[in-house]
Image (cartoon, rainbow, N blue to C red):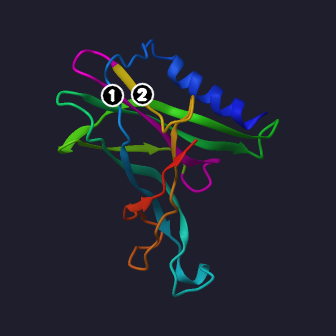
Amino acid sequence: MNKKLLKLGALVLCLGAYSTVYSQGENVLGVPSIEVRGQQSGYRSKAEYCLDPAVACGQSGGKVAFQVRYKNDTLPWGVKVELLRGFAGQDWCGGCEPSYHKFYNWYDKKFVEMTAVEPWTWMVQTEAYGYADGAGGQFDALEFVVRVTYPDGTMYWDNGGPSWGYYKVDVPQPLFDLSWIPYQVYDSPFESLRVHTW
């Protein structure tokens, strides 16, 4: 299927679930600054199972988490800022009849209200639990748009600019550490991630 159609269909399904009126009125959303940090949990294998015993290796632990920081100094006092987020990923089962390997977008989509942490700056942490090693799938990316509700009730969607677009951040690999007890699940440290427009 055409990639543009996939993108359009994913966001139409996502936003179509909400009967929201898209209106700017006299409110104009300026250029925002968006920073995202993320992590994926994991567990460390024994050193003898790694290609280099001096470098920790392991598998996914089944949880992903992201911290989204949104700054826009053109917004007035009293606005409500929300993150509409979902996940891109894949499911597979080679031993099923019939076997399958499918990809998805906007899984587990939900609105999450962002909290003001500084002037003109909002932040939220969002998490999802799903796939551990051998679970037959994986999360590949966080997908999101930002909804701004002005004091007069006007709503505006920040989707990165493209028509029917959205922001996308790849899920990071677990940052395994030699200090981890083998086969015990740990949360990796958060790391800064690149934000793409899709």
Q: Whole-percent x and y of residue 100? A: 77, 39
Q: Assess disc 1: are there few (<14), some (14-19) or many (≥20) residues with their C-alpha within 10 Å of its C-alpha.
A: some
Is 151 a magenta residue? yes
For mark 2, what is the residue? Answer: 157
Q: Which mark is residue 148?
A: 1
Which quarter of the rendering shows the N terminus?
A: top right
Image-based side of 136 in relation to 60, left or right? right
Part of the protein shown in magenta: 132-154
Name the foreground residue: 4 vs 66.
Answer: 4
Q: Whole-percent x and y of residue 12? A: 58, 22
Image-based side of 23 in relation to 136, left or right? left
Residue visible at 58% across and 41% down in the picture: 198
Residue visible at 53% across and 78% down in the picture: 46
Name the foreground residue: 20 vs 33.
Answer: 33
Name the foreground residue: 61 vs 193.
Answer: 193
Residue visible at 33% across and 31% down in the picture: 82
| Amino acid type, residue under disc 1 in the picture | Val
Residue visible at 17% across and 30% down in the picture: 77
| Amino acid type, residue under disc 2 in the picture | Trp
Q: Assess disc 2: are there few (<14), some (14-19) or many (≥20) residues with their C-alpha within 10 Å of its C-alpha.
A: many
Residue 51 to residue 184: above or below: below
Q: Secondary structure at mark 1?
A: strand
Q: How many marks?
A: 2
Q: Whole-percent x and y of residue 92? A: 70, 44
